[in-house]
Image (spheres, coloured by chain):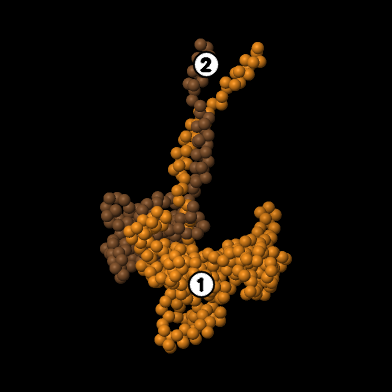
Amino acid sequence: MPGMGRRGLAKDEELNLVPIMNLVSILIPFLVMASAQVQLAVIDSTMPAISEERPDEEPEEDEDPPLQVNVVITDQGFSVRHNKASEEDEEAAAATEEEGEEEDGPTVPCVDQQGQPVTECMTVLVGSACEAATAAGQGCIQDNYHYAGLTEELASIKEEFGEPCPYIEGSPEYGNFNACDINLDESTLECDRNIIIAPESAVRYEVLIRAMDAARTESRTGNPNGADIISEGGLRVRGVEERDLTSGEYNPERPSDARVDRVGRYVSRKVCSENSETGERTTREEEIHNELFPFVVIAGGTAGASE
Amino acid sequence: MIKKSKRMEVDDSLNITSMMDIFTIILVFLLKSYSTDAIAVQPSDELQLPMSSAQTSTELAVNVVVSSCPESVARTGGCVALVVDGETVISSMEEREDANGDSTLLFPEDELRGELIAGLVDALEIKADMAKRMGERLGNDEAGFNGRILLQADRLLSFEVIRQVMYTAGQAQYGEFRFVVRKPS
């Protein structure tokens, strides 16, 4: 039976996998070498440059100077200061000074794991407590800094005094303009989003990094009233009044949410895009990450003037 | 008899298919963790990068590595305190007591010139000069001097050390810092 014989032959035929095996076994060591055990990222920061004030130029008194926030990291917590303190605050501060009560304590004191304020921000665990912490995957140095509190504090400052960036959602310019008519660059995003962080000498590097994270992120996300409804010409939040985009006014009653809040995570801006084939320029909307204070300056070092 | 010899033949050949299966899975896994980062970090006890929520990816720049490297470990060749682009600048840190009586690791006094780290400023000035000349010769800004530094530092170092590095880099015209951090995996 010739047919049967052929079928028998077909059964015995096997794909010759040996060359593929060779290939794979060479690829594997190469990939093992190139694989990353740790995922890395970077945080940008610039140093305050030395600026020599020119004597012939009088420093202009700005009616409405940009918001400037300083965070001092001490061994007792975070002290947050900004240049937009209201008159009432100043009066209150003056009053406490007169009473002899000095405002020494940090704005955001350290808290322990139960949320109680503590004076010691870095607790060094010893003995069995250290072993337990190591087993739980933490180090023997317990970090009591209240990062969530810092974020809250900064968010409230920004909400109260910060201006929305020009040409992004929420600003007066946003309603009606053509992004292709004006020259928009990244510097338009630097609006009330700068922060100066000044740690004390003994503060650990990790605390600085985590404070920078706290300054950048926004803890309040999600609108308790449900999803946002995007209507023509404005953003409406379900159950809450529509925000007036032409005047840039915010409804203070409106709960904070992920998409539209001034200190929220995402806002949209208009960008100009050019069609590479026809050369036609059109305006389109783009969502950007609206972080609290992403531009961090670390006080302590100064950049030398370049030659 | 014939049947028996046939079975022997079958047993002789290695069944490679299952091995292929294993290798394919390993291959896929390794391809997933393949990294194109501009820098590679070998984690050690003396150099633990802090965790952060930052998402910006790394880029090529002058690489400054500061680890909390006590003299006892440095002597055995276990670590190096300050490295610039692979070149050792300071071999070990010095343990000193701060105002509270806690011991902290700081750069040795004899390596410092006031606030400046003498070795670092020299190394960075050479790098800056080289980058500037390279930029001039190639005539493109990408290759030229941009004043950027990638700083990898141990998470437990005190800010005093970081400040000295930043100050020194600033004096050597490196004003833009990129703190290298670990993404939570």
Q: Which residue is mark 2?
A: B6
- Tell which of A157 and A296 is nearer to you: A157
Label 1–label 2 contact, CB within 8 A: no
Q: Which chain is orange?
A: A
Graded by Cα atoms within 10 Å as few (under 14), some (14 to 19) or many (20 or more), the crowding at tag 2 reads few
Judge left or right: residue A137 versus residue A260: left
**Horizontal and vertical percent position of residue A150:** 48, 69
Q: Secondary structure at mark 2?
A: helix
Q: Residue at x 66, y 64 (%)?
A: A226
Colour for chain B in the figure: brown
Judge left or right: residue A209 versus residue B80: right
In this rendering, the answer to whether A108 lies above or below A137 is below
Judge left or right: residue A61 versus residue B160: right
Q: Which residue is mark 1?
A: A153
Q: Indicate which label's residue lies in the foreground, 1 or 2.
A: 2
| Residue that lies at the very extreme toward the right in this rendered image | A232
**Horizontal and vertical percent position of residue B8:** 49, 18
Examine the rendering and report whether any part of residue A259 can be seen. Answer: yes
| Residue that lies at the very extreme toward the bottom in this rendered image | A98
In this rendering, the answer to whether B6 lies above or below B80 is above
- Tell which of A174 and A129 is nearer to you: A129
Image quarter of residue A250: bottom right
Q: Residue at x 67, y 55 (%)?
A: A275
**Horizontal and vertical percent position of residue A37:** 45, 48
Q: Are marks 1 and 2 on the same chain?
A: no
Q: Residue at x 46, y 87 (%)?
A: A95
